[in-house]
């Protein structure tokens, strides 16, 4: 019994050592990370376990950021363009949009002062400098005296008066060249330096092409007022209202594209700063109960654009100089039907083109159409505002930024209506008419800004989902590291 007791005592002392020697993984012990590598990866040694079972929040944030930013070292195809565009690209686009806004307003002044036909040639390079001596001025004035506008409207114009309208048109053209150069050169730089994402690079190239097309439309428009065969004999010499509207519409499209893309880049950066909160916001905006509101904002943008283009027809035909009262037109709410659909504007023997030529060439009907579109725009804005204000669903779901954007649209549409009515009543004075044109672009801008706060682009949603998944994956890796005594799992 004594010998058995001694043997049991010896086995009890030897058992712990045998357990460590037989069941310890030697390879794991040899491959355990050194302390220096751990400190380099995570900044400092981490506590094993706090009293509440969690790591301190600063440590968690640092680790999450480390995991989220870590990229695979091999087997992944690198991208030529970054995932998101740089903020400097956004500021450049917004600055270009401001320049286009200014040239649109100045172009309206050029039209109102009848200065657009003072330069009779299109010289993109050599025409950058104005006449420098008396001989050059006499040559330019001689060219202008051969135009229908001088013969019918300004036969008594002096050289000094010609210089004033010449400088208006010259400034407009120089501004257009500045818009083109200030867009093309930075665009090439940003694309070459990979400051933009791949989709944004394509959009920038498209805007550049639109600017070049706009320059061509400008000369095509001016050319229509330099020949007698391009307008009715004996009528007021003016550029074609079709070409004027096309020129104006392209400028509006350029401005809208610059504004929208600039704001989109800033919005991407703001949303990706906190992907989890942004994901909840995007899900709220994609709620089916907001579908009517989202579509209404898009329809409102189209309506504002069409109203502005009808204003281009009014300007091209000088239709604002007739029926200078509001809300009636003459003795009734509308002019007589025979005046609205007159055979005078038909170009065919069977008068089959009366139904479409009058809305585009008859000043009376063109002004009536503009009144109807403007009234429809105002009514639509106020109706949409009432929908957001009194609908319980929209009051609870619609974010505060969207509500503020809607208030901005209401303010701009009220200002634009007031400018339009006063411009008509006071026979189109220069300051009011110019402000009215600027107001149309400002109103469109407010609708675009509202749309940027309301619509959910698919690409932005995809980027947010990727960031959320990366955050979840980082948290999973952190949990594995925190609850493991071995090497942390880093993908």
Image (cartoon, rainbow, N blue to C red):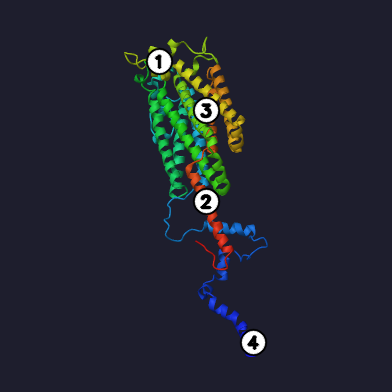
**3D distance between C-alphas at marks 3 and 4:** 104 Å
Label whose residue precedes the other's in the sequence (3 or 2):
3
Q: Which image quarter is the N terminus in?
A: bottom right
- In front of the other: label 4 or label 1? 4
Label whose residue precedes the other's in the sequence (2 or 1):
1
Disc 1 marks which residue? 235
Q: Is residue 424 left or right of residue 350?
A: right
Residue 5, which numbered label? Answer: 4
Q: Residue at x 42, y 43 (%)?
A: 202
Residue 467, which numbered label? Answer: 2
**3D distance between C-alphas at marks 1 and 3:** 29 Å
* Residue 120 visible here: no
Circle 2 packing at 10 Å, graded few (<14), some (14-19), many (20+), is some
Q: Is residue 280 left or right of residue 462?
A: right
Identity of the residue furthest to the bottom in this view: 3
Q: Is residue 482 above or below residue 435?
A: below
Could you say which is closer to the camera, residue 389 or residue 229?
Answer: 389
Disc 3 marks which residue? 440
Could you say which is closer to the camera, residue 22 or residue 45?
Answer: 22
Q: Is residue 117 left or right of residue 51?
A: left
Identity of the residue furthest to the left in this view: 349
Q: Residue 177's spot in the image, x, y percent? A: 44, 36
């Amino acid at each position: 019994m004594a010998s058995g007791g001694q043997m049991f005592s010896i086995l009890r002392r030897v058992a712990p050592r045998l357990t460590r020697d037989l069941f310890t993984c030697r390879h794991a012990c040899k491959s355990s990370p050194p302390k220096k590598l751990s400190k380099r990866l995570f900044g400092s040694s981490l506590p094993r376990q706090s009293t509440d079972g969690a790591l301190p929040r600063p440590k968690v944030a640092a680790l999450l950021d480390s995991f989220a930013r870590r990229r695979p070292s091999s087997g992944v195809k690198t991208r030529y363009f970054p995932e998101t565009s740089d903020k400097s690209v956004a500021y450049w686009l917004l600055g270009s949009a401001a320049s286009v806004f200014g040239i649109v307003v100045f172009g309206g002044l050029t039209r109102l002062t009848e200065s657009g036909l003072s330069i009779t040639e299109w010289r993109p390079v050599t025409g950058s400098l104005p006449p420098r001596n008396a001989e050059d001025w006499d040559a330019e004035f001689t060219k202008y005296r051969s135009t229908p506008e001088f013969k019918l409207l300004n036969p008594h114009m002096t050289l000094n008066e010609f210089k004033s309208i010449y400088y208006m048109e010259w400034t407009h053209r120089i501004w257009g060249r500045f818009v083109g150069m200030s867009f093309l050169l930075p665009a090439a730089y940003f694309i070459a330096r990979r400051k933009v994402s791949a989709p944004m690079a394509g959009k920038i190239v498209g805007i550049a092409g639109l600017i070049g097309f706009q320059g061509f439309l400008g000369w095509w428009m001016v050319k229509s007022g330099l020949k007698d065969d391009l307008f009715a004999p004996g009528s007021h010499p003016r550029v074609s209202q079709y070409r004027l509207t096309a020129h104006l519409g392209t400028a509006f499209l350029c401005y809208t594209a610059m504004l929208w893309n600039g704001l989109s880049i800033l919005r991407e950066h703001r949303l990706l700063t906190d992907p989890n909160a942004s994901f909840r916001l995007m899900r709220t905006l994609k709620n089916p109960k907001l579908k009517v509101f989202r579509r209404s904002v898009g329809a409102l943008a189209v309506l504002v654009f069409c109203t502005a283009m009808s204003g281009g027809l009014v300007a091209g035909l000088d239709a604002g100089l007739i029926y200078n009262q509001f809300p009636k037109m003459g003795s009734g709410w509308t002019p007589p039907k025979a005046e609205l659909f007159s055979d005078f504007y038909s170009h065919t023997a069977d008068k089959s083109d009366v139904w479409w030529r009058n809305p585009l060439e008859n000043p009376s009907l063109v002004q009536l159409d503009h009144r109807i579109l403007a009234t429809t725009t105002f009514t639509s804005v106020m109706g949409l505002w009432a929908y957001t204000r009194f609908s319980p669903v929209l009051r609870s779901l619609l974010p505060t930024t969207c509500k503020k954007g809607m208030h901005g649209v209401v303010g701009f549409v009220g200002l634009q209506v007031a400018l339009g009515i006063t411009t008509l009543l006071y026979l189109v004075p220069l300051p009011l008419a110019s402000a009215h044109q600027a107001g149309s672009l400002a109103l469109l801008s407010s609708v675009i800004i509202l749309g940027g706060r309301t619509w959910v682009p698919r690409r932005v949603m995809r980027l947010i989902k990727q960031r959320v998944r990366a955050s979840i994956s980082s948290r999973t890796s952190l949990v594995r590291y925190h609850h493991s005594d071995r090497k942390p799992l880093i993908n």
